[in-house]
Amino acid sequence: MTMDARRPAASSIGILGGRVVGLDEDVAGVGARQMLDLGGATVLPGFVDAHTHLTWTGTAAKLINIAACRTKEAILDAVAQAVERTPQGRWVDLTGYDQRPLGEHLTWRDLEKVAAGRKVFITHVSGHACLISRSVLDTITDDEFAGVDAGVVRDDDGRPTGVLLEDSMTLARSRRLPYSLQEIVDAIETASRQCLSQGVTMCADAGIAAGLGGFSPIEMAAYQGSLEQGRLPVRVQTMIPAVMLRPSDADPTDGVPRAIDLGLRTGLGDGRLSIGALKMWLDGGMMARTAALTEPYGDGGLGQLTYDDDELNSLVADAHQAGWQLAIHAIGDRAVDQAIRAVEAAQAAFPRPSARHRIEHSGVVRPDQLPRMAAAGLTAVIQPTFLHAFGDDYARIMGEERTGWMYRGRAFLDHGIPLAGSSDRPVADGAPLRAIQFMVERKSSAGLPVGADEKLTVEEALAAYTTGSAYACRAEGRAGRLAPGTYADLVVLGEDPRRVDPSDLADVEILATMVAGEVVHGAV
């Protein structure tokens, strides 16, 4: 399956220098150094994950994950285990904290029972919150808390409980960071190997070096080191957080009022490692109840916005004018409104039809927002597996009408909005086939329907993780299809996904994954 409308299928493929040089009759009778007979297996272009977090995934893989803990006692037992195995003087890190099964957040007082005197940092399963111990809290001043007060959860006496949301997390993360380059290189390789095992050959790392996704201010150096050491087996675009922009002091006629050092922007690099979009976070996440909505959550609250309209409009205009592609995190419909307005204003002031800006997540999109997204040229970069994993909870807090607006599929395509598939790993299972199954079935892990009107065909869902995600990454001429001149990045499947029962799509075996014509996972 070539995913190329001009030639949808082929039975043989020629590869030279890491690229496709021909199909079927193009290469018939041509000699080759190596001939591979796949015995009738199904071959697709390698999947492209348009929004993932490799360093976070790799570091989290080494931590105790408490996502399965459903009681306070189970969480504290896991924390006690982590304390026991972590040498004195080192931070005690865990991941997967989730307050929802508990009915309320834990506090630093709970952690004191098993970790008194230790610096404990527990990342929320969404990545948009954390729980810290008293030893970490004591390093943060009242003035620092006041500067990010909207994200500081406080008790009845007005004192921080140890739960920090969104930007306030940086107060604790700044005490924990940075990770060393070697730690990051190890994490990137671990996560990359996980991607390959799921048929993913290209990733966009959605925010490095600073902000919620950063692990070191020189994190790009870790990516460069990974490539030089032969430890970056997938293609990567790195997104640069917008908080790194600063006045450029460039000539005003250049139209670059703000920039990162040296004027670097989207597109620098090559097919193995490059700078992708500029990442900006407009709101939080649904699990943390911080995604910004126009109507309240079922259990209360409207979430929160990162910027006021004037701040965002200025930031988007400056970045757009400077030539960046924008990757705008907007999960709630209130944040989506903000994103659309800011892009509309930037395009009106500085027309750039080829900008190809993206809305990351597009988690709750009202019907009236669909034509505006299309007219603004925005791409929807969604994570269908969120609704497989968390759909029952999301449906409960959104209500019947808004459930149909979540992580849409059909409505985006019907309105001509480019649709890109992604995972946001490690927040959810990164396997594209799992997401593709959800897009076709629209059922949660419990088997309940979630926005059934948004179902796609298998072919449309596959396109979201190949041609659609390659388009979102501005790589559609090189990735996401199999045609002369494209990368020879392939995934070999044990069955044809169009021929299996939709409920079995996630279980289709990945026999092998190839990058630039070389087998990097499995065997053929």
Image: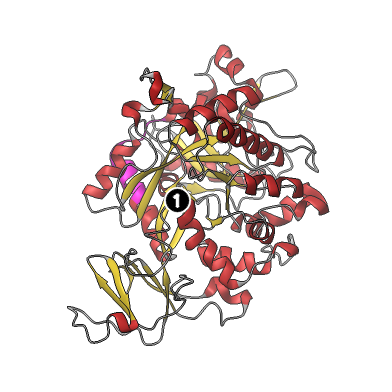
Residue 497 within the segment the image draws in magenta:
no
Q: For this view, does 62 lie left or right of residue 358?
A: left
Query: Residue lying farthest top?
Result: 143
Other residues around mark 1 within 10 Å, as few (<14) / some (14–19) / many (≥20): many
State whether residue 125 appears in this view: no
State whether residue 501 appears in this view: yes
Residue that appears at 67% across and 47% down: 71
In this view, 102 is above or below 497: above
As helix, strand or loop, the secondary structure at mark 1 comes to: loop
In this view, 56 is above or below 46: above
Residue that appears at 67% across and 62% down: 410
Span of residues in magenta: 177-188
Q: In the rendering, at what x and y percent does residue 254 appear?
A: 38, 25
Q: In the rendering, at what x and y percent does residue 28 appear?
A: 27, 85
Q: Amino acid at mark 1?
A: Cys
Residue at image mark 1: 473
Q: For this view, does 398 lie left or right of residue 152?
A: right
- Which is the main secondary structure of the residues drawn in magenta? helix
Q: In the rendering, at what x and y percent does residue 318 appear?
A: 49, 27
Quarter of the image with the C terminus is bottom left
Q: How is the image coloured?
A: secondary structure
Q: In the rendering, at what x and y percent does residue 283 appear?
A: 63, 35
Residue 185 within the segment the image draws in magenta:
yes
Seen from the viewer's position, the closer of residues 158 and 345 is: 345
